[in-house]
Image (spheres, helix red, strand yellow):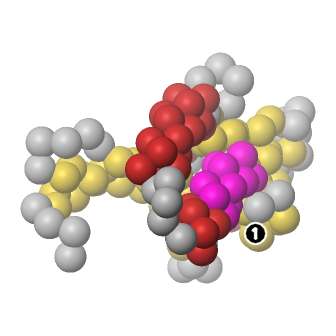
Amino acid sequence: MRSRDSKIEFNFKKTLIIYPLMFLIFLAIVHFMIGINKPILIFFVVFFIISMLYMKGYYWKLHGGLLAKYIFFCKSSEINVDEIQQITSVTFRLGKGPAEDEYIFLLRDGNEIKSFAHCLNRDGKSIGRYLNEKYKIRLVEKTKYKLNNI
């Protein structure tokens, strides 16, 4: 078994930038919707709240060689770090736009678990890079090009 880690959290850090931006967009939508029926406004408010909860409630915890994924503050999966055979870093290139990254953890039993690459620890290191550096798990980088959203 690998060395015991202290409890390390990988949080969705981009929310620090996205929160104010989303709030401004939300205010612009509300401003343009004055006079429009309330069900549409309620839909946008609910969507805004769910988006905020998801960004705050999606994180990973690494403790004692176990890696646990949380969604909406509930544990959705837990894997032993020793079971990870390979980490694939996928970069999506959408034309000339910014990259969107994700990690795919390939387990020894053939299962795959995906994670956003935006989950960072306190030092600013992503979960895939941290596991690659600390546990010497093989990291494979792939780039996928998309010209449309199909």
- In the image, residue 66 above or below residue 74: above
Residue at x-position 20% and y-position 76%: 150
For the stretch drawn in magenta, the main secondary structure is helix
> Where residue 4 sits: x, y (%)?
88, 39
> Where residue 136 sits: x, y (%)?
57, 40
Which quadrant would residue 132 be assigned to in this image? top right
Callout 1: few (<14), some (14-19), or many (20+) C-alpha neighbours within 10 Å?
Answer: few
Q: Is residue 66 left or right of residue 109?
A: right
- In the image, residue 75 above or below residue 142: below
> Where residue 84 sits: x, y (%)?
62, 60
Q: Is residue 94 left or right of residue 133?
A: left
Q: Secondary structure at mark 1?
A: strand
Q: Amino acid at mark 1?
A: Ser
- Foreground residue, 133 or 27? 27
Which quadrant would residue 124 be assigned to in this image? top right
Which residue is labeled 1 in the image? 77
Magenta segment: does it hold 57? yes
Range of residues picked out in magenta: 45-59
